[in-house]
Image (tube, helix red, strand yellow):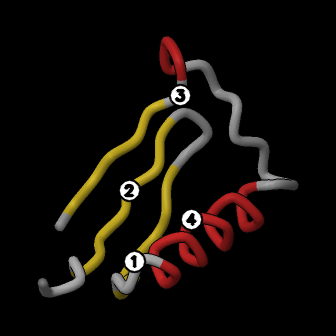
Amino acid sequence: MLFIYATKERQPLIRSDVEQLVYDHIKEQLIETGCKACIINGMQEHIHLLFLLKPF
């Protein structure tokens, strides 16, 4: 599944000094719910997530 998250009003809020921390947190949340994170990346105003949903 592909998700794209954007910051409010596309403001450049994801600073480079915290960018990897944000991606790691999202990855941890996906793993906790049983999903497999394939790719997490983005820019200052949005994040792309490519992951596999947990089969039910």
Q: Residue 49, which numbered label?
A: none
Q: Name the residue under label 1.
A: 39
Left-right relation of 35 to 26: left
Rendered view: 52 above or below 4: below
Q: Name the residue under label 4.
A: 26
Q: What residue type is labelled 1?
A: Ile
Q: Which of marks 2 and 3 is nearer the N terminus?
A: 3
Q: In which quarter of the image is the N terminus?
A: bottom left
Foreground tag (2 vs 4): 4
Q: Say whether disc 1 or disc 3 marks the residue closer to the N-terminus.
A: 3
Number of on-image labels: 4
Real-space CA distance between mark 1 and mark 3, rounded to the nearest whole angstrom: 19 Å
Image location (x, y in percent) of residue 21: 77, 65
Residue 7 is labelled as 3
Q: Residue under label 2, please give it.
A: 48
C-alpha distance separating marks 2 and 3: 12 Å
Q: Which of marks 1 and 4 is nearer the N terminus?
A: 4
Amino acid marked by disc 3: Thr
Judged left or right of residue 49, residue 29 is: right
Q: Do the residues labelled 1 and 2 touch (CB within 8 Å)?
A: yes
Q: Nearer the viewer, mark 3 or mark 4?
A: 4
Relative to 14, say whether 8 is above or below. above
Q: Residue furthest left?
A: 56
Helix, strand or loop at mark 1: strand
Residue 10 point in image, percent of width and height: 50, 20
Question: Alpha-carbon distance for marks 2 and 4?
Answer: 11 Å
Q: Quadrant of residue 22?
A: bottom right
What's the residue at 87%, 55% (across, down)?
A: 17
First in sequence: mark 2 vs mark 4: 4
Image point (52%, 81%), residue name: 32
